[in-house]
Image (spheres, rainbow, N blue to C red):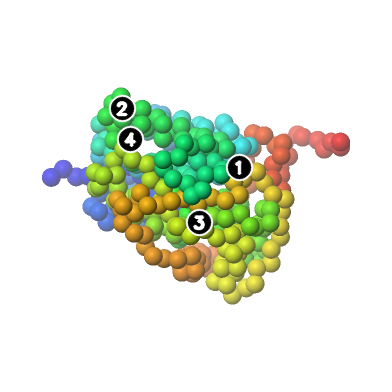
Amino acid sequence: MSKIRSLVTGGAGFIGSHVVKHCLAMGHEVVVLDDLSGGFEDHIPEGAVFVQGSVYDETLVANLFEEYRFTYVYHLAAYAAEGLSHFIRRFNYNNNLVGSINLINESIKHKVKCFVFTSSIAVYGAGQLPMREDMVPMPEDPYGVSKYAVEMDLKAAHEMFGLDYVVFRPHNVYGENQNIGDKYRNVIGIFMNQIMQGQQLTIFGDGEQTRAFSYIDDVAIPIANSVNLPAAYNQVFNIGADKPYTVNELANVVGACFGVKPDIKYLQARNEVMHAYSDHSKAHSVFGEGSGIGLAEGIRRMAAWAQVVGARKSKEFENIEIYEKLPQGWERKPEGATSTTA
């Protein structure tokens, strides 16, 4: 029997590192491609081959496919900062769309058996609750636009060339290995990092926006296993937790896991979807029920891990393209800019 060889892009990142772990457990030979812009090499499970580089590097991607002849591709590499994507449009589309097309091209050429893509509920936009796969996506930010464009390209590639695919739309995933030092995304990691540094917890708006925060096992395990389930092929699945919570409720749960009462600083509301949660009945019918790990237990597990690895210094994003209307706390002046008064 020939060996199963899988490419996991973003495999040094949060969800990707967990998918690598589960693929290795299924007996796959795994190659990780990651530029380490948001991940860490020590997150990559032992036994995987690591290649440092970007999916945007067309030559590198082509060489990897030629060398390893992958059976499956799990594409998780992306810069998943919805709010910031308005201000980094070129970066967003190069990394999240053009980079994906490089992978799809090579998957077609090398007859990959299945291309597994992590999209996002950002494709739905606002006002569609609960979000269901039969709804027409209406993304409201460049990140969601790029994700939906890849979904449409995969459908076109299947119809033209027979490339099988599975699309997952996860949301608000948290757990061990999350980059808690990224101030632009992953509110749970941000809260934990702030608490460990003795800082106030920052919340945009009044904190009454709702999200269904999803523990990593409810997402990574189905993603890894999807290639084994013919019923999943050429389908789109919402995946994650069913119960939404407000960000204020989340702050209290995170604080309790660290034994502190949250000291919250409310910032000016930013342009974001107020309520976002999805229906998962389709995923449950194919992958079964989730892990059963609720928010309090999932946060406890992540907090225990975070306390071991310690706080991480938040990095500024260095390639802001548009400075107008940057949300409070994200403001940075371009080099050489001078202050002006109205």
**Residues under labels 1 and 2: Cα distance?**
33 Å
**Residues under labels 4 and 2: Cα distance?**
25 Å
Tag 4 residue: 64
Q: Are marks 3 and 4 in contact (CB under 8 Å)?
A: no
Q: Counting residues from the N terminus, which is met first, the one under dot 4 or under dot 2? A: 4
| Residue 228, position as x, y percentages in the image | 24, 47
Nearest the viewer among 231 and 325 is: 231
Left-right relation of 14 to 256: left
| Residue 334, position as x, y percentages in the image | 71, 36
Tag 2 residue: 159
Query: Which element type, helix, strand or loop, lies under badge 2?
Result: helix
Seen as rendered, the residue at the extreme left is 1
Q: Residue at x 40, y 52 (%)?
A: 280
Tag 3 residue: 212
Query: Which element type, helix, strand or loop, lies under badge 4?
Result: helix
Residue type at mark 3 is Ala
Q: Residue at x 30, y 47 (%)?
A: 226
**Residues under labels 1 and 4: Cα distance?**
31 Å
**Residues under labels 3 and 1: Cα distance?**
21 Å
Residue type at mark 2 is Glu
Tag 1 residue: 84
Nearest the viewer among 181 and 278 is: 278
Residue type at mark 4 is Leu
Please state which of the two labelled residues, at mark 4 or mark 2, is closer to the viewer: 2
| Residue 36, position as x, y percentages in the image | 47, 46
